[in-house]
Amino acid sequence: MAFNRSTMIELLEGVRTFEQDVYPEKEQLFRNLAYHQNPATLFITCADSRISPPMITQTEPGELFLIRNVGNIVPAYGINIGSTSSAIEYAVAVLKVKNIIICGHSNCGAMSALMDLDSPKMRKLSTIRRWLCNAEAARASLVDIDPEHPTPEMIRALTEANVRLQLAHLRTHPSVAAALARRELAIEGWYYDIPNGRLRVLDLLEDSTISVDEAIRELREQQSDSANAPAISGHICHPHDHHGHR
């Protein structure tokens, strides 16, 4: 296939629109961000082009520290230490983020591939196959999976199981474990449904999810309880102190 110059032209025209129209409206924001960043949230999601974290969360530049890779995977500490592990350590130990989100999504190609890593197709994709081995435990945890006849429901179940597994891997990173122990960090798992534009928050104690409205209500109740409780030196409210998802 010949190099497609039209797509590059479209990208550059988009940059020109940014320079001429978008930047002037947000010039002060970018000037404030010129020499430092202070994001509150580390957002780990898939490299899939259909996922736009700033659009989904309606955040501005400087608010999300992003990690993107195939399958929103977090290798357990000590395994495949590389860009994902170093970015996590930087976000938590240096930037002092207060939240970490791992977000899976519907119709994820990585999860479809994870269904059968021994397929002829996957054997030809050796790098991706090795990477997805970091999610094999999620596949093994599901007994009602038919790799030869995967359904959307199976893919969703595997996607949610993978998010839970990667959250467990996340806790093995020393910087994360220390911040959680100090109650300075909250972690959440999300599932984003692309065609419906809806997001579900995973219950980290039960095998279920709740809506965004339910999650907001729970967090506000916890926030209110924390505000009304006697002050405890050094205590930072953790969203999972009293999780009661249904």
Image (tube, rainbow, N blue to C red):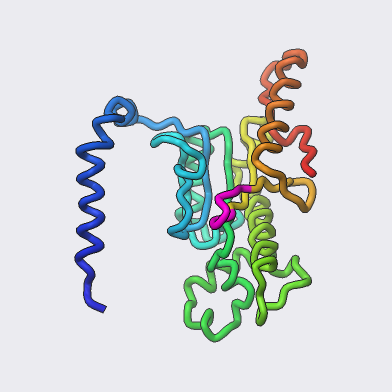
Q: Is residue 74 visible?
A: no
Q: Is 218 situated above or below 168?
A: above
Residue farthest toward the bottom in the current orientation of the protein: 120
Q: Position of residue 235 (x, y in %)?
A: 69, 22
- Up-down: is 100 above or below 121? above
Residue 194 colored in magenta in the image: yes
> What is the tally of numbered marks visible in this picture?
0
Q: Relative to 124, is 33 on the left or the right?
A: left
Quadrant of the rendered structure where residue 136 is? Answer: bottom right
Residue 142 visible to an observer of this rendering:
yes
In the image, farthest residue toward the front: 196
Q: Which residue is found at the position 22% from the left and 72% from the top?
A: 3
Image position, residue 105 (x, y; %): 57, 57
Image quarter (top left, top right, bottom left or bottom right) of the N terminus: bottom left
Q: In the drawing, does residue 208 fall left or right of residue 71?
A: right
Residue at horizontal 64 percent and vertical 43 percent from the top? 188
Q: Nearer the viewer, residue 192 or 63?
A: 192
Q: Quadrant of residue 159?
A: bottom right
Q: Bounds of the magenta span?
A: 193-199
Task: Give left or right: position of 98 versus 137.
Answer: left
Q: Residue at x 21, y 51 (%)?
A: 13
Instruction: Reply yes or no: does residue 246 show up in magenta.
Output: no
Quadrant containing the C terminus in the rendered view: top right
Q: Residue 222 appears at what percent x and percent y?
A: 73, 27
Residue 201: percent from the left, percent from the top? 66, 45
- Please report the residue visible at 77 percent of the width from the left and 41 percent of the height from the top: 245
